[in-house]
Structures are given as structure tokens and as C-alpha cells.
Image (tube, rainbow, N blue to C red):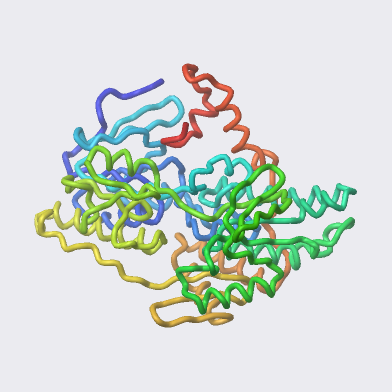
Amino acid sequence: MSSEKKAYRPAGGRHHVVVIGSGFGGLFATKDLKDADVDVTLIDRGNHHLFQPLLYQVATGILSSGEIAPSTRQILAGQENASVVKGEVTDIDIESKTVTTHLGNYERSYEYDSLIIAAGAGQSYFGNDHFAQYAPGMKTLDDALEIRARIIGAFERAELTTDPAERERLLTFVIVGAGPTGVELAGQLAEMAHRTLSGEYRNFSTDSAKILLLDGAPQVLPPFGKRLGRKAQRQLEKLGVEVKLGAMVTNVDETSVTYKAGEEEHTIESYTKIWSAGVAASPLGKLVADQAGVEVDRAGRVQVNPDLTVGEHKNVFVIGDMMGLNRLPGVAQTAIQTGQYVAEQIAAETEGTQQPEQREPFEYFDKGSMATISRFSAVVKMGKVEVTGFIGWLLWLAVHVMYLVGFRNRLVAAFAWGLNALSRKRWNLATTRQQLHGRNGLNKLNGLIGPDADFPIEVRDTRRFGEK
């Protein structure tokens, strides 16, 4: 392994800010430090900024991955005080003020003056991690592409089978979790089956596909309130989605999903299962929390101070999905606003206009929540204002176009949404066998290797910090 003994810091002696994560929080913090007297090193395991709320549109063929995941280097190419590093963060030492990364055979350490941890969150299976083999989540580009391959693969297999029971299983799609991701994915799956793919298969009708949305809560979209939850459920049912509430999933295996409703247990035979029921903060949060002597909650979120710092360490900030503060939602706006707040504090302190003890507490401005159900239908909640239907859909379009990064991506996404509204066709339905089998193949390879063996590059280069 190639490694540098001495921790890196930029030449010139300026205040060095290390940012972990190129999601909304990390990217906005970096960009807001553009004019500050600092050097910024942005570290991420990927090479792109991911617009995570639109992953389901990649999974269902509306958008391509490039529209929602532009290159981080291209985004920051014009920011002279920012450098981008691709690598998996494997250690943070808040006493020595260093961050260690790995990329394949390369190990590097970076010394910081201020640290912003914005590594986001992954999927949570609530202690049932074995479910992941059969029900992928929706947190990364790999997840979205695998789900697309599973969906299209189900229809292709249904075309080949002559067994009615097997065809029914292949055409049964189960989504666990009725939050925004689950609702939006269920709506798009229904449109795919009943509109996009209609008439494209010769041996069966795609209208026979069944989409089931399961959740243990008593309503869909709980954060939106009862009224909007009921409207969203009615619209989903109008599209042909079967919504099952109060359904606690107890098992997921290769062929089925089992859930408990009241005292009764039910099993659904299904080829394609998708999990969107919970999130768990990056384990980097617990790594830092343990060193700082602070707690993490059940989802791994770090309990931060009002200025988003950790314990007594005024130069270590945890933001976005990784922080626990005032029950703030794990949404893009929280990440954006916390990233901008931290950048403002660092800039002021490097300029000498503010001391750490003079920081004003972070205040969150709730800009509302929205979810699209189908073409021409969305639900929007902005404070006490609730909007549904076509007007809600227009608002959803406007907001998402605005927050996509780059003029080209905004233009292409708007054009794709317009085409999707007018035409039943979708132009991003290509799949590969590698997309379908890659994740589980690597996990099996990992399992075949003994604990004392050297991991091959295929495993070492794709493992996440905290994975066993």
C-alpha cells in the first residue's frame, strides 16, 4: 500500500478546512467558503455530487445518472481555494486534527484547522441487515441502477415464463416505507407498468403488475400531515397501487416479503423488493462522538451543540443527516442550511470579526416539503399552506429544477419531465447484468475471504467505513 507518513496540508499556511462529503451540506459549505481566507479540501468516496431526492427517477428511467450526479471536480473547477480528493475516510483523530483516507492501495492523511463532517446517511434495516441482499435501498447511484435492473429484469422474466404463479410473483413489486421516496417510487412504478411499458411485451399485459406499498405507520407521508397523507394515498390507489398501512415487515427473503398486521401475519410472493423505510447516519459520526464524549441516537446521529460543533471541540462541525439537533428533518434543506451556517462561522473567524464563543445558534428555516405522486400530481406543504394536484406538481418542478447543479442538468431534466408528461416513452431504461448482480457479488466475495487475509482490490475499493 502506498501511504504518506506526514499529514498533508496546503502550502501557504492559511486556515485549512477539511470537508467530508460532497452532498448538499458539504458542497454548499465548500462553495460558501469561496471568498474566505482559507484553503478547502473536500473528500468524498465518489466523484460526484448526488441529488439524492431524484434517485427514484433514475431507477424508473425518467432521468439518466448524469443529470442528478455531476462531477464534483467540474462543479468546483473555478474555485481556486478548493481541492477535491476521492477516497473513503477510514479514520478521524480530533486530537491530532487529522483525517485519513483510502482509495485502493493509496492511503493519505490530511491535517485540518476546521473539520466539517457531512457524510450523510445510508439505509437502515432496523437491525435486519440481511434484508438488504433481497431488498436494496435507495441512497446511491448504484442502488438506483440496481433497482432499475431488478424492475426491468422482472418484466423480462415474466415474458419468458409459462408458469402463471411464477409470472404473478415476477409482476409483484413490494416497496417498504411510505415516506417521500417510497410514495414517489410507487407512483412511478405504477406509471411504468400501466403506461410506459404497455403493449411492449407479447406474452402478458403489463397492466397485470401489482405494486404494493407497505408501512408500519397509520398513514403515508407522516411528516405532511393527515390531510395530505390521505390525498396522496387516494392518488396512489387511483394509479393502481395497493397501500397497506400498519404493516410491520418481519422478513424479506429471495422469494417473498412477510409482514404483520395486528395479530395476523401475511406473506407476499415477490421477485422485486425495494426498501425505503429508514436511515442510519454514517458511522463516522459515532467515531467522532466517542472521541468527543457525546452521545449518538438510535439512528447514529451525533448530538451537537447549538453551533453544530461536537462537545468541547469548537473546530469540529457535524451537519446534515448526521447531526441530532431539535428534531430537525433529514432533508436537503437541513443539509444546505447547516452547510451555509458553518461556512459563515469559519469565514467570520478567519477574518477576525468573530470568536467561536460569539457564534449565534443555528436557526433552521422550514421551506416546506413536497412529493410527486405521478404526472400532474404532487403534494406540497409549506407551513400552514397545503397544495395538491397540478399546481403542486408545477411547484415541485420549479423547486427541483432550481436546486439541480449546472445549467445543462437543469435544462435536460426540465426537457425530460416535459417529454414524460407528453409521451409514454422513457429513454433511460438500459440495464446491465453487472448492475443487477454487482453489489451482492462483491458481498459474497467479501464473505469468502478469511478475517486475516488481504482483501482483493475489488472488495477493498468498494467497502464503506464501518462495514464488516
Residue drawn 37% across and 27% down? 107
Is residue 420 shown above or below 144? below
Residue drawn 22% across and 41% down? 292
Residue drawn 63% across and 63% down? 186
Is residue 466 shown above or below 308? above
Q: Percent x, y for residue 38?
A: 21, 48
Q: Percent x, y for residue 394?
A: 54, 77
* Quadrant of res 87: top left
Q: Is residue 197 visible?
A: yes
From the viewer's perspective, is 76 left or right of 169? left
* Quadrant of res 189: bottom right
> Foreground: 125 or 402?
125
Residue drawn 50% across and 34% down? 462
Q: Percent x, y for residue 359?
A: 15, 59
> Foreground: 264 or 184?
264
Residue found at the very far top of the displayed protein? 452
Is residue 237 shown above or below 91? below
* Quadrant of res 17: top left
From the viewer's perspective, is 228 left or right of 311? right
> What number of labels is visible?
0
| Image quarter in which the N terminus is found | top left
Q: Is residue 10 visible?
A: no
Q: Percent x, y for residue 150?
A: 69, 48
